[in-house]
Image (spheres, rainbow, N blue to C red):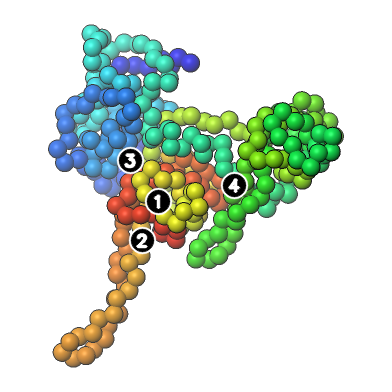
Amino acid sequence: MIRIIFSMFIGVAALVQPAAAAAPVELAANAPDSYVVKKGDTLWDISGKFLRRPWRWPEVWQMNKDEIRNPHLIYPGQVIMLDRSGPYLRLGRRVGRDIKPTVYTEDLADAIPSIPQNEIEPFLSQPLVVDEQNIQNAAVIVATQENRLFTGQGDTVFAKDVDPGTDQWHVFRPARPLVDPLTKEVLGYEAFHLGTAAVTQHGAPAVLQIISAKQEIGSGERMLPATRPEITSYVPHSPEASVEGRVIGVYGGVSETGRQGVITLGVGQQEGIEVGHVLALYRARGEVKYKDPETGEKETFDLPENRYGLVFVFRVFNRVSYGLVVDASAPVQIADTIRNP
């Protein structure tokens, strides 16, 4: 797939979040005047060379609003130039090519992503997060090929409640509940992804072939329409409304993670969360009791929270979302607080 891009962006940056408008964008210490893009870079890392807060890079790129929402991609060899009067970031002349501002083409596979694509790609189609309504409305496998107890890749299954307009399906089993660590409310279920199936014949029941299988699939398994992974250049931005929630899980069954780790957040579409939102990570320091050595008087102090990192939201469900930890000075733990950056 070929994408047409311009060697210089035009227009003025128009997408400035209300929360960020009150504070000017600050340059990083020792910000360079220019930087040559290298293979393996991300827009987040590149912006971190110029800006104190890398997630605010859409505010300083010389792009119009539509381009911000669907930005032109950047490629190795291009030069990023800093205009300190704004500050603004612009694309300059490409290294090794004597090119005036004009149109050229590049392969999308070589483009520089916003965040490390390899870290999140496995999560774009799975895991699935379902709620009680999803489970009740899901299609159900009612029989297997030759009444086998379990089936695998290439086998045939039969299912009810299959939408005739959908041919590709995720096969899943409701598994681990996602629970708010403070309120104990169940926000959804992280379904165990068993595999994928494709309809070969619509009807009641529909006939499907198992395309892939992580485990054996049997009668009673649930199915939801399969969405194609969206490999896109996510644009970081702050939520417009106030957001507060908690880290409710660390992917992989471990108790904590660090930079480049994937975490589950107890906020989703219902709280206004969308793909690209950047949220700050906080941890309570607890309280301390102080006794005056002279008077013996005792006092209790609630220590201020420690803001220690940022998380970049890349997949959103109704009340739950997944985020990539893009910055952390301490391990991310379950029950840590998330808020607007």
Q: CA distance from mark 1 to mark 2?
A: 14 Å
Which residue occupies 49% across, 66% down? 182
Which residue occupies 36% across, 61% down? 283
Label 1's element? strand
Q: Is residue 198 left or right of residue 29?
A: right
Q: Is residue 244 left or right of residue 9?
A: right
Label 2's element? strand
**First reached walking from the N terminus: tag 3 or tag 1:** 3
Between disc 4 and disc 1, the foreground one is 1
Q: Where does label 4 land, which residue?
A: 129
**First reached walking from the N terminus: tag 2 or tag 3:** 3
Q: Where does label 3 land, which residue?
A: 55
Q: Where does label 1 land, which residue?
A: 257
Residue 244 seen anywhere in this rendered image of the structure? no
Vertical side of 191 occupied by 76: above or below: above
Which residue occupies 37% across, 49% down? 258
User: Residue 190 location, x and y as percent?
Assistant: 59, 49
Between disc 4 and disc 3, the foreground one is 4
